[in-house]
Amino acid sequence: MKAGLVSALAALAACGEAATTPKVTPRDELAYSPPFYPSPWMDGFAEGVEYMYAKAREIVAEMSIPEKVNLTTGVGWQGERCVGNTGSVPRLGLRGLCLQDGPAGIRFTDYNSVYPSGQLTAATWDRVLINKRARAMGFEAKGKGIDILLAPVAGPIGRIPTGGRNWEGFSPDPYLTGVAMAESAMGIRGAGVIACAKHFVGNEQERFRQAGEAQRFGHDISESMSSNIDDKTMHELYMWPFADVIRAGIGAIMCSYQQVNNSYGCHNSKLMNNLLKDELGFQGFIVSDWQAQHNGVSSALAGLDMTMPGDTTFNSGLSFWGANLTLAVLNGTVPAWRLDDMALRILTAMFNTNLGPDQLPDINFSSWTLDTDGPVHFVANENFEVINQHVSVQEDNANLIREIAAKGTVLLKNEGALPLKKPKFLAVIGEDAGPNPKGPNGCADRGCNEGTLGMSWGSGTANFPYLITPDFALQAQALKDGTRYESILSNWENSATRNLVKQDNATAIVFVNANSGEGYIAVEDNQGDRANLTLWNGGDELIKNVSSICPNTIVVIHSTGPVLVTDWYDSPNITAILWAGVPGQESGNAIADVLYGRVNPAGRTPFTWGPTEESYGTKLLAKPNNGKDAPQDDFTEGVFIDYRHFDRISEEDPDSAPIYEFGFGLSYTTFEYSDLKIQRNDIGEYKPTEGETLEAPILSNFSTDLADYVFPDDVRRIEQFIYPYLTTAESAEEASGDLNYGQKPDEFLPPGATDGSPQPRLRSGGQPGGNPLLWDAIFTVTATITNTGDIDGEEVAQLYVSLGGEDEPVRVLRGFDRLSIPAGESVTFEADLTRRDLSNWDVVLQDWVITEHEKTVWVGSSSRKLLLKGTLDFAAGPEPEQPEEETPEPETPEEEAPEEEYPDEETPEEEGEE
Ligand SMILES: *[C@@H]1O[C@H](CO)[C@@H](O)[C@H](O)[C@H]1NC(C)=O
Ligand SMILES: *[C@@H]1O[C@H](CO)[C@@H](O)[C@H](O)[C@H]1NC(C)=O
Ligand SMILES: *[C@@H]1O[C@H](CO)[C@@H](O)[C@H](O)[C@H]1NC(C)=O
Ligand SMILES: *[C@@H]1O[C@H](CO)[C@@H](O)[C@H](O)[C@H]1NC(C)=O
Ligand SMILES: *[C@@H]1O[C@H](CO)[C@@H](O)[C@H](O)[C@H]1NC(C)=O
Ligand SMILES: *[C@@H]1O[C@H](CO)[C@@H](O)[C@H](O)[C@H]1NC(C)=O
Ligand SMILES: *[C@@H]1O[C@H](CO)[C@@H](O)[C@H](O)[C@H]1NC(C)=O
């Protein structure tokens, strides 16, 4: 016994050692981010900013250093009413800017709406709805006095299926996400609010994104993880949607917590100076994620324009900027033109969104309490007044929310069970159909998983004004129809459930879920990211139990991404499966609309449903792998995430073929595709951008006498508040309080960082979004889509392209449209293929090039249901030509897959619920 115990302990110790002290990779062997300086200053002639730049420039020329610093620096965590507030410029009548979460509704207030997640919205594949959602959210923000809404999200894009915040973004496909980002940016701006795209870039998992947070969960690391991403993958995948959103004129971009190539997101000059500001011509401002700034001078030189929430760490009362930025400009380590450029970028974005002085709405809420009266300066507990006016901003947005949730819902399987038509007896089973006993907002930042999943957890959440549960909506419908209705809102009432669903003629609807969220909250040991891909709360057992005795079992899944359905999806007793994502406040109404056929489903899954977690080929970096130093996450799969990965492997490994492929979804009607046409358009040659920028503008002179920057007597000092002023004029060192103050600039400043002379322009750059010629439409593809069924419906036609060449994806999405087609009628699908759509990133040339390889296009109803096929003929003149046209051909194994994978071939029965 004793020997056994000793060896067990020894094994434990060895195990523990292996787990706690992984090998440390020498610094010079780690991925490295090359420096890129100086930080590009605004191009006053760039498209979209030309008018407001001139106005901003006049104003900045008159501003003092502390005024400019105020624009760039937050007042500190909970210093004022929003999640982030900048300093004000009283001389100009400019109150501090209000920055607020988030991407699915306004966080930390009341009388606001809760929208479907970005992911479910992407599943609509409907540009108009995506735009309307953002616009409605923008107006809600405006109505609360918010100036900058921290949305939309393209990072994470969804590299890892268990990634905690994938639901906040759209889709692991960069084209779909890019379209959604651009529409969202335009929608939010249309409401007079600055949109802030986030997180740039590589924030693909929650674990290790911040060292401090990881330590709280017991991970012994001193630096945040590094996402190591090669140049081609960066351009073709992770940066792609940011190019779209910049081209759409977005005002702000948030840099991310984690490192890229071992340089922090908000300090990385390659990411901010080179990629965002130079190549993509971003003319807005870059704001840090909350506490993602770790140093003052280097972040300024690397391209950061605004620090949030402004303090070094929450409530330290100290700042890397504020007084330190004032000092850094005075001592010349940060050139004055760099501070001017920060201010110009912020003011131009404001003016471009009608947010000039006197146009800023009153902030009528406080993030830190729902009490009506309270302190404006929450953490200092000062300035008591009415801080929550409880203004309702919901308008009639509920209708839009319901529409999006229903139109995003994906019908994955239907053996004739749906739509429901006055079923005799409906049995609704599962905790996910019912309310949270604590109420819809009972868990802070929705950090729990009780009741139906209407919203996941983290900073991307909002308070529900109400939550229509599936049980509530389905019961209301049943009462109207004279349907017998019973629900069991638990996953664990086995005998009661059996007794109910075994009864004759029961239509059982089982509601199940899988949740995830942001990394500062763990729910059931899921530290933001999901610990697995299976359903929560015994969902699989529940489905199996019900379907083993009820031959008409319908499954509804609420989730933040794919779940494993492998064990049960093909059971003949499971007659329908729906994915309803994370639907927001109208959850029950939306699912009832689809179940009863008021909305003919046309949602298409924005990600792949693989048979196992391993089948995705990408997974969470779960354990530190570099000693206590930054965990290293090598994105070795390159662009092969989600369907690109599944398509690549499925030839060798048919067992890993997806159960439901990217872009898949059924309808209650049927469609036929025909008549593919590819037209070569008459466009000019590609021309690399050439020449040089202007020099950095010198807008004004300033005094370097410290005494001119000390706290003015007439400014009352609020506790923990961040100001641009010096506490003393005795010495800069003392005013800074920085132990390393005065380090010789040439010892730590990167070469060229303070150089304001004209800079060469990048060949792939030139305008917001990159070289404008990348958006020339070389081809226009059309096809005819016919509704061959008896009821009106909507179809999402999808255009895929193979760019050809070694180690390239089998095909990539390059166009789509959601088309409304009345029964028996046909419509024309049309999509442009731009130069960018047909190019690969050439890492040597540092530009987009169309390779020599043959390029095939397909139009179909999913990434594997490729109904029409043609070849791009670059030599063809602008005359329309007759391309070859085919019905689905059995060239790839997935097209020989069993029929039930493509049940939309079958005409659903009209009355199949018995
Ligand atoms: C990261 O390193 C890879 C490999 O050297 C390089 O291709 C890429 O451009 C680097 N990216 C950044 C942002 O430093
Ligand atoms: C900076 O902002 C603070 C807080 O809003 C304000 O009290 C101060 O007057 C501002 N300073 C300048 C120079 O505008
Ligand atoms: C200036 O920044 C340093 C860190 O670089 C910090 O230690 C110091 O407290 C800051 N000073 C002020 C006044 O916030
Ligand atoms: C079940 O449905 C069938 C067909 O509609 C009907 O004949 C039968 O009577 C029903 N059974 C019960 C118990 O209602
Ligand atoms: C996966 O995680 C969920 C949520 O924590 C849990 O309910 C479930 O049991 C886990 N599944 C497995 C197979 O461990
Ligand atoms: C389907 O349901 C019937 C009861 O109607 C049951 O006998 C059968 O075993 C079930 N089949 C499966 C695969 O669960
Ligand atoms: C300039 O000021 C910044 C901010 O306080 C400080 O970090 C830096 O060390 C100073 N450099 C010199 C050369 O004085």
Image (tube, rainbow, N blue to C red):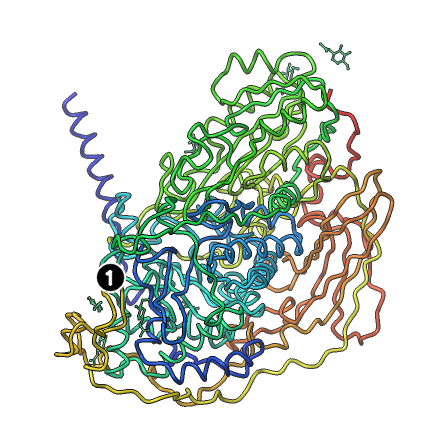
The amino acid type, in three-letter code, at marker 1 is Ile
Which of 574/445 is in front? 445
- Farthest residue toward the front? 385
- The residue beneath circle 1 is 718
- Image vertical order of residue 630 relative to residue 774, above or below: above
Asked which secondary structure carries label 1, the reply is loop
User: Image check: 121 left or right of 638?
Assistant: right
Q: Position of residue 102 (x, y in %)?
A: 47, 53
Quarter in which the N terminus is drawn: top left
* Whether residue 439 is visible: yes
Q: Position of residue 589 (x, y in %)?
A: 63, 35
Which of 675/513 is in front? 513
Question: Which residue does the image show at 45% across and 84% down from the upper left?
Answer: 58
Residue 73 in which image quadrant = bottom left
Q: Position of residue 432 (x, y in %)?
A: 52, 30
Q: Position of residue 399 (x, y in %)?
A: 64, 44
- Ligand 4 resides in the quarter of the picture at top right
